[in-house]
Amino acid sequence: MQRLTVRVLSTDGDDEYLVEFKRADDRLSVTCTCGSGKYGKLCKHKMGVVLADRSVELVDASADTIAEIAGWLGHTDYVQLLAEYSAAKSTLDSAKSEIEKVKYRLERAMRDDDQF
Ligand SMILES: [Zn+2]
């Protein structure tokens, strides 16, 4: 079994968590020591490291480690699942935007502006 770990900062910067990747055969597990991650939830730390975006601040990850993790991910079904996640999130964001527009129109329609 191969193992890679990345230390990350909590959102408020007060805590550090360990995101760990374990690879054996065609299986890749990703765990995190944060409150959500401990229960197997998809926390922002796992997603931040997997997506290699800047949503999570890495404490001690080398470029080589990040590249190796990306290579491991390429051999899993994570790629397809991440694409589905991204598409669903995009749909949700569009729906949220539409709700805000309709709410605004409703607020305007319901406004009491003494024009009766
Ligand atoms: Zn976490």
Image: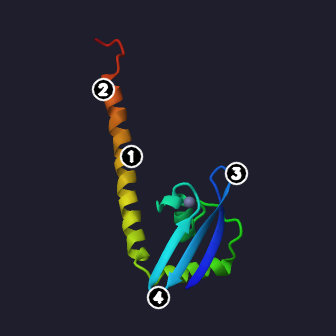
Q: CA distance from mark 3 to mark 2?
A: 46 Å
Secondary structure under tag 1 reads: helix
Quadrant containing the N terminus in the rendered view:
bottom right
Q: Is residue 25 above or below residue 103?
A: below
**Disc 1 marks which amino acid?**
Ser
Secondary structure under tag 4 reads: loop
Give left or right: position of 51 versus 107. right
Closer to us: mark 1 or mark 4?
A: 4
User: x and y percent of residue 19 in the render?
Assistant: 59, 68
Residue pointed to by mark 2: 109
Q: Quadrant of residue 110?
A: top left
Quadrant containing the C terminus in the rendered view:
top left
- Mark sitting earlier along the chain (4/3): 3
Residue pointed to by mark 1: 97
The residue at 64%/79% (across/down) is 65
Q: Is residue 65 above or below residue 115?
A: below
The residue carrying pointer 1 sits among few (fewer than 14), some (14 to 19) or many (20 or more) residues within 10 Å by Cα, namely: few
The residue at 58%/58% (across/down) is 34
- Mark sitting earlier along the chain (1/3): 3
Query: Quarter containing ligand 1?
Result: bottom right
Disc sitting over residue 25 in the figure? 4
Closer to us: mark 2 or mark 4?
A: 4
Q: CA distance from mark 2 to mark 4?
A: 60 Å
User: x and y percent of residue 80 in the render?
Assistant: 38, 74
The residue carrying pointer 3 sits among few (fewer than 14), some (14 to 19) or many (20 or more) residues within 10 Å by Cα, namely: few
**Disc 2 marks which amino acid?**
Ala
Residue pointed to by mark 3: 14
Give left or right: position of 82 versus 7. left
Secondary structure under tag 3 reads: loop
